[in-house]
Amino acid sequence: MKHLEYIDDYFKGADSASQSRQFEQKLLDDPIFAEEVAFYLTTQGLLQQEARAEKIAHFRKLYQQQRTTPLRVVKPQYRIWRYVAAAAVIIGLIFTVTFLLPISKQQLADRYIRQELSSMGVSMSATVDSIEMIRDLYNKGKFSDALSLSEAVISHNAGNRQALEFAGISNLRLQQYDKALNWFKQLASYKKDYTNRGIFYQALTLIKRNQPGDLPLAKTLLQQVVDEDLAEKATAEKWLKNW
């Protein structure tokens, strides 16, 4: 499409009054140019932009006039419709991949990590303690430092659930899945309630590790989360439906 830049400048308002008249006259005289403009509008989505609605409406009128006014030489042009057809195929493929194909277990796990574990919420405590320091390091992406401090806290207080959780998810973000599983098993050994994600985190880590036997065990753990009404029950139910 040799006129693409020229067409783009017109619809972005980078034209003078004389250039606008020239553009409009070209629409009336040149059917190939008119088809290129039609293709541009289709692919760029300008029909949905209110800021350019007046120009587009004006173009429609001129384009319709061009289509109904006999020209001196009119040759059938098919190449531009091949572009339109190709664009339609691509859009169809994107729709199929995005909305129709099932989401893999790895994608579910990656999405959870990206959305839920990218940063951890800050507590309302006015004091600065070790857990807040760990949280700050983790949220800054310093997973190794967060892990080291978590391990130091656990060495003095083996039952600190927050430190166990941070140790586990830090190992998870570092892709050290075996170590993460050990921390999450320790976390799960404490009171199982809707704040203890130990069981769910084990399933998440097994999905990410994806070694032989990991996925069946992950499914079993997710079912346990649902049956015992544990933390992340809603997420576990959703994942099991896509299993």
Image (cartoon, rainbow, N blue to C red):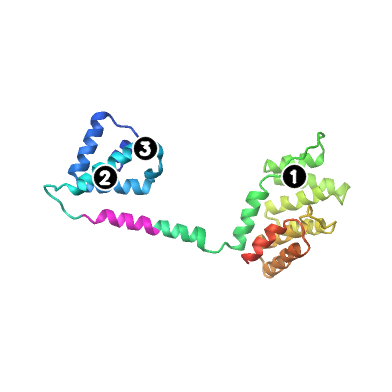
Q: Secondary structure at mark 1?
A: helix
Residue nearest the viewer, comparing 138 with 217: 217
Report helix, strand or loop for mark 2: loop
Q: Is residue 26 above or below residue 239?
A: above
Disc sitting over residue 2 in the figure: 2
Point out the tag, 1 or 2, that comes first from the N-terminus: 2
> What crowding class fits label 2: few (fewer than 14 Cα within 10 Å), some (14-19), or many (20 or more)?
few
Residue underneath mark 3: 52
Q: Is residue 200 visible?
A: yes
Q: Residue at x 46, y 58 (%)?
A: 95
Q: Is residue 177 above or below residue 2?
A: below
Q: Quadrant of residue 146?
A: top right
Q: Is residue 219 left or right of residue 30?
A: right
Question: Which residue in the protein does label 1 denote?
Answer: 146
Q: Quadrant of the C terminus?
A: bottom right
Tell which tag, 1 or 3, sits nearer the viewer: 3
Q: Left or right: where does residue 223 sit relative to residue 6?
A: right
Looking at the picture, which amino acid does disc 2 mark?
Lys
Rendering coords of residue 62 (x, y %): 24, 42
